[in-house]
């Protein structure tokens, strides 16, 4: 059986050749990593955001077969995102929570780059849609986590 090698959260894993399947499908169905949510399934909402080579990517519309760099998911970023996640909880920056893993993963990429300006954070996160919170609390949390 043809196989494909990926590096996920620091570990090299071998999965069945994914064909045209997306990173989100491979993570969720083959590896049991379900934090990246699939909402729109077509690259429009950001719920499925993971980091590929440190850059935010829509896992639902990224073919797994094309990925060579490390994939980081919300599960693998649990320790690094602890302060940010606590801030989300304290400030009520989520309601249904469906968008939250994608927001957190994307925010980690911003924090690594030292981005702290609220306007810039709002702009950078504009591809991560949230139908519940109105965004201000999310931006506040990222600012707080980076301070
Ligand atoms: S589920 Fe991937 S962008 Fe919406
Ligand atoms: S918390 Fe519900 S979509 Fe963001």
Image: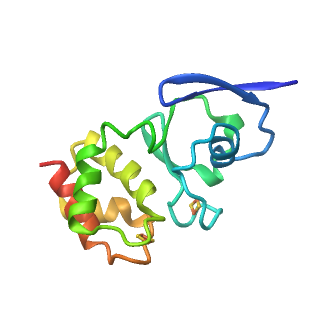
- Image quadrant of ligand 1 equals bottom right
* Residue sticking out furthest to the right: 1
Q: Residue at x 65, y 63 (%)?
A: 42
Q: Residue at x 35, y 68 (%)?
A: 94
Relative placement, left or right, of 124 versus 7 is: left
In the picture, the quarter occupied by the N terminus is top right
Q: Is residue 120 visible?
A: no
Compared with 79, 97 (above or below) is below
- Which is more toward the observer, 89 or 106? 89
Compared with 24, 67 (above or below) is above
Q: Position of residue 142 (x, y in %)?
A: 24, 56
Colour scheme of the rendered structure? rainbow
Relative placement, left or right, of 133 versus 38 is: left
The image quarter containing residue 89 is bottom left
- Marker count (numbered): 0
Q: Position of residue 86 (x, y in %)?
A: 24, 53
Q: Position of residue 43 (x, y in %)?
A: 59, 61
Relative placement, left or right, of 47 versus 109 is: right
- Which is more toward the observer, 78 or 73? 78
Q: Is residue 114 visible?
A: yes
- Which is more toward the observer, 10 or 65? 10
Q: Position of residue 138 (x, y in %)?
A: 28, 65
């Amino acid at each position: 059986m043809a196989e494909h090698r990926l590096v996920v959260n620091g570990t090299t894993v071998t999965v069945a050749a994914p064909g045209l399947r997306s990173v989100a499908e491979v993570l969720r169905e083959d590896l049991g990593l379900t934090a990246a949510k699939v909402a729109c399934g077509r690259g429009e909402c950001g719920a499925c955001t993971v980091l590929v080579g440190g850059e935010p990517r829509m896992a639902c519309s990224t073919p797994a077969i094309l990925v060579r760099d490390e994939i980081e998911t919300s599960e693998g970023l649990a320790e690094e995102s602890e302060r940010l996640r606590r801030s989300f909880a304290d400030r009520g920056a989520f309601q249904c929570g469906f968008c939250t893993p994608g927001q957190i993963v994307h925010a980690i990429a911003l924090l690594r780059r030292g981005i702290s300006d609220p306007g810039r954070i709002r702009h950078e996160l504009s591809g991560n849609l949230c139908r519940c919170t109105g965004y201000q609390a999310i931006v506040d949390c990222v600012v707080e986590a980076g301070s």
